[in-house]
Image (tube, rainbow, N blue to C red):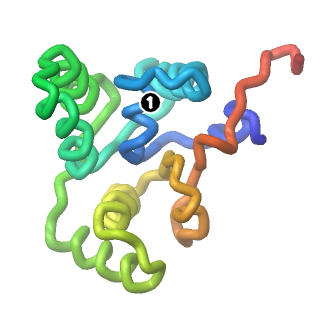
């Protein structure tokens, strides 16, 4: 396990994969709640500039639309489209070509390749995911949520 403080030292721009945002907004999964609150808090405070691609918007909206959960739908729209210090990245032809390269090189699924290509294209320092298959991508620091822990300031 790695301490959040250490891992995020020097990171000014962070791209989010879909799962961590679902853990934060929807599931409130107990194993990830404190860590995601810490990371989103840093984005909200302006310590980190957050990014996600429009692929994430598509992926997170499916469940609330299927269930007719307008409150959750509004929460996702607010989080991804209206949060300060957070930007949605559109997929353009350059990002698609970079994603094709990543997909062929690492045998990624198309959504993963697009997410990472978008993060790289805008110059993110790191990509937050819980997908261990993405760990070995070159050129972008990949942070696996399961590898993180929060320790107190006193080291307890």
Q: Which residue is mark 1?
A: 23
Image-quadrant location for residue 98 = bottom left
Numbered label tally: 1
Residue at 37% in and 78% down? 103
Toward the front, the furthest residue is 67
129 left or right, relative to 153:
left
Asked whether the viewer can see residue 42, the reply is no
Check the image and report above or below for 35 versus 143: above
Check the image and report above or below for 78 versus 66: above
106 left or right, relative to 132:
left
Q: Nearer the viewer, residue 89 or 69?
A: 69
Secondary structure at numbered mark 1: helix
Could you tell me residue 51's position as x and y percent?
34, 42
Q: Quadrant of the N terminus?
A: top right
Tell me the crowding category of disc 1: few under 14, some 14 to 19, or many 20 or more residues within 10 angstroms, Cα based: some
Could you tell me residue 18's position as x and y percent?
36, 44
Could you tell me residue 153's position as x and y percent?
80, 16
69 left or right, relative to 29:
left
Q: Quadrant of the C terminus?
A: top right
Residue at 34% in and 58% down? 115
Asked whether the viewer can see residue 82, the reply is yes
Q: Nearer the viewer, residue 1 or 52?
A: 1
Check the image and report above or below for 1 versus 117: above
Residue at 68% in and 33% down? 4
Could you tell me residue 45's position as x and y percent?
45, 18
Check the image and report above or below for 58 versus 134: above
25 left or right, relative to 150:
left
Residue at 35% in and 67% down? 113
């Amino acid at each position: 396990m790695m301490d959040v403080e250490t891992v995020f030292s020097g990171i000014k721009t962070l791209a989010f994969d879909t799962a961590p945002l679902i853990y934060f907004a929807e599931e409130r999964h107990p194993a990830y709640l404190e860590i995601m609150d810490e990371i989103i808090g840093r984005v909200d405070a302006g310590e980190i500039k957050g990014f996600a691609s429009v692929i994430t918007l598509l992926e997170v909206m499916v469940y609330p639309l299927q269930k007719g959960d307008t409150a959750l739908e509004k929460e996702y729209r607010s989080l991804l489209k209206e949060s300060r210090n957070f930007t949605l990245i559109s997929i353009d032809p350059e990002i698609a070509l970079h994603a094709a390269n990543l997909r062929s090189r690492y045998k990624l699924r198309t959504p993963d390749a697009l997410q990472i290509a978008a993060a790289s294209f805008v110059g993110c320092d790191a990509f937050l995911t819980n997908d261990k298959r993405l760990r070995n991508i070159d050129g972008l620091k990949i942070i696996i949520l399961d590898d993180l822990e929060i320790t107190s300031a006193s080291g307890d």
